Image: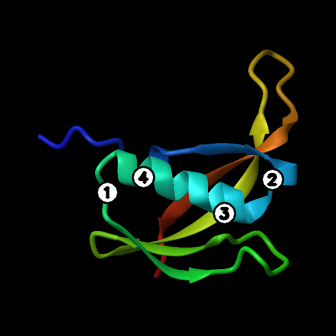
Amino acid sequence: MDNRTDPIEIIARVSENQGKQRALEVWLYKTHKEGWRVTVESSSVDQPGNDCGVVAIEGLKYRIRPSTRPRAGPKASPGPGSSTTPRGPSR
């Protein structure tokens, strides 16, 4: 049984002012720490838009995008941070 956290569940919590580059670096670090072999296919951290890049993990491609981090509680609203999560296999 594989006890690694699924890459789609790995979240890199960084503040918005740290930028997409830092978000991608943190996500890559956490993914490697879980034991996944990740190859960065392309990086778009210096370009406008919502993508940090595309990575390949064991034959599957994932698009990495930043998103706002919701706050817990009954009145959840986007917080001042961002989370970077893969959006599933790219086709």
Q: Which mark is residue 36?
A: 1
Disc 4 vs disc 2: Cβ atoms closer than 8 Å? no
In the image, 50 versus 29, the foreground residue is 29
Q: Amino acid at mark 3?
A: Arg
Q: How are the residues colored?
A: rainbow
Disc 4 vs disc 1: Cβ atoms closer than 8 Å? yes
The CA span between labels 4 and 2 is 19 Å
Q: In the rendered image, which residue does mark 4 sit on?
A: 31
Q: Visible in this render: residue 6?
A: no
Depth check, mark 3 against mark 4: the one in front is: 4
The CA span between labels 3 and 2 is 14 Å
Mark 4 vs 2, N-terminal side: 2
Q: Is residue 75 left or right of residue 8?
A: right
Relative to 63, residue 76 above or below: above
Residue drawn at (85%, 35%) of the image: 79
Q: In the rendered image, which residue does mark 2 sit on?
A: 18
Residue drawn at (58%, 52%) of the image: 26
Say which element carries label 4. helix
The CA span between labels 3 and 4 is 15 Å
Q: Amino acid at mark 1?
A: Trp
Depth check, mark 3 against mark 2: the one in front is: 2
